[in-house]
């Protein structure tokens, strides 16, 4: 047995074998055991901090990532508009909006011969308006009311060919078939019974009939469709008026047109 004095180790020191040193620190033989332990603690602490930062980063990414719009994943709501409402007027041709034909059962005469017709509610208000104008000495005459798509085809293509007009030129004066307000049964061309020469002419604005309409038509639910410099680019038509006096007619002409309310003096 060897003498402890010649063992190369202090008598009271605790032996530290290679197996007692963590594998991560065995490559540093010149580092004292306590120093090695400190490095071990620091190494473990760094791993924990790194892991914590990774968790926080993942949480922040999940929080800030764009979310899918839940509305787009839901089915479209059922249309709640009246059964006989027109379409959404998103289909335009040469500045004219799309309209569907009024059913024959909804039409009523507004002229003595019965040829000019409007929807029943519009026809009733038109008759009331004519009576009010007559009491003021003004004669309102219906020139053209409801027109079918077939009639509009002849008016657009047939007359356009006779006048050697391109579709764009013709559209400034008459709507393409399927895109005329007259299809709805709510629109009517009005003339002055005492000045027939102004029928369907801009000179109609100089008649008593036009002046009366400008002042009184709104009381009966009528408005001019195409004033000067209108947003659709249609020629000025002082004779063309439409009924907007109930829910269906209002939605027919104003849905999806992005028209803002007009401020008027109280």
Image (spheres, grey):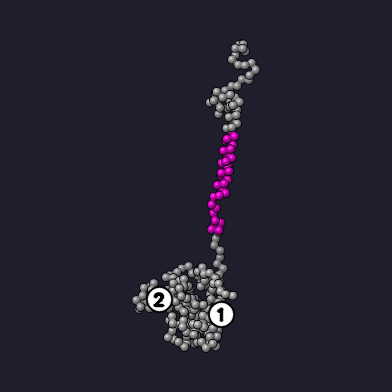
Q: Position of residue 143 (x, y in %)?
A: 46, 83
> Residue placed at 64% from the left, 16% from the top?
11
* Percent position of residue 52, x then y: 59, 40
Tell me: 158 left or right of 58: left
Check disc 1: other Cα within 10 Å, few if <14, some if 14-19, many if 20+.
few
41, above or below 103, in the image: above
Q: Residue at x 51, y 73 (%)?
A: 253
In this rendering, the count of numbered labels is 2
Q: Nearer the viewer, mark 1 or mark 2?
A: 1
Residue at mark 2: 156
Residue at 59 percent of width and 37 percent of height: 48
Question: Mark 1 sits on what residue?
Answer: 219
Which sits earlier in the primary sequence, circle 1 or circle 2? 2
Q: The magenta stretch spans which residues?
A: 44-73
Depth check: 136 or 4 in front?
136
- Let me know if residue 129 appears in the view: yes
Quarter of the picture containing the N terminus is: top right
């Amino acid at each position: 047995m060897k003498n402890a004095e010649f063992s190369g180790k202090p008598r009271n020191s605790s032996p530290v074998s290679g197996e007692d040193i963590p594998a991560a620190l065995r490559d540093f033989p010149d580092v004292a055991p306590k120093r090695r332990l400190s490095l071990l603690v620091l190494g473990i602490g760094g791993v924990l901090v790194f892991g914590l930062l990774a968790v926080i980063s993942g949480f922040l990414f999940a929080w800030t990532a764009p979310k899918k719009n839940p509305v787009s994943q839901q089915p479209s709501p059922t249309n709640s508009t009246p059964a006989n409402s027109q379409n959404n007027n998103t289909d335009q041709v040469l500045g004219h909006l799309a309209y569907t034909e009024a059913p024959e059962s909804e039409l009523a005469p507004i002229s003595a011969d019965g040829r000019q017709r409007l929807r029943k509610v519009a026809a009733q208000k038109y008759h009331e308006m004519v009576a009010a104008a007559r009491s003021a000495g003004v004669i309102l005459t219906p020139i053209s009311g409801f027109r079918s798509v077939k009639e509009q085809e002849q008016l657009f293509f047939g007359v356009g060919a006779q006048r050697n007009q391109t579709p764009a030129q013709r559209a400034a004066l008459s709507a393409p078939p399927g895109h005329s307000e007259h299809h709805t049964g709510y629109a009517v061309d009005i003339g002055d019974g005492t000045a027939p020469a102004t029928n369907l002419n801009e000179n109609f604005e100089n008649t008593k009939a036009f002046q009366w309409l400008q002042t009184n038509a709104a009381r009966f639910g009528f408005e001019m469709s195409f004033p000067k410099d209108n947003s659709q680019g249609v020629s000025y038509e002082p004779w063309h008026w439409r009924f907007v006096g109930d829910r269906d007619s209002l939605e027919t002409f104003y849905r999806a047109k992005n028209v803002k309310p007009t401020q008027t003096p109280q």
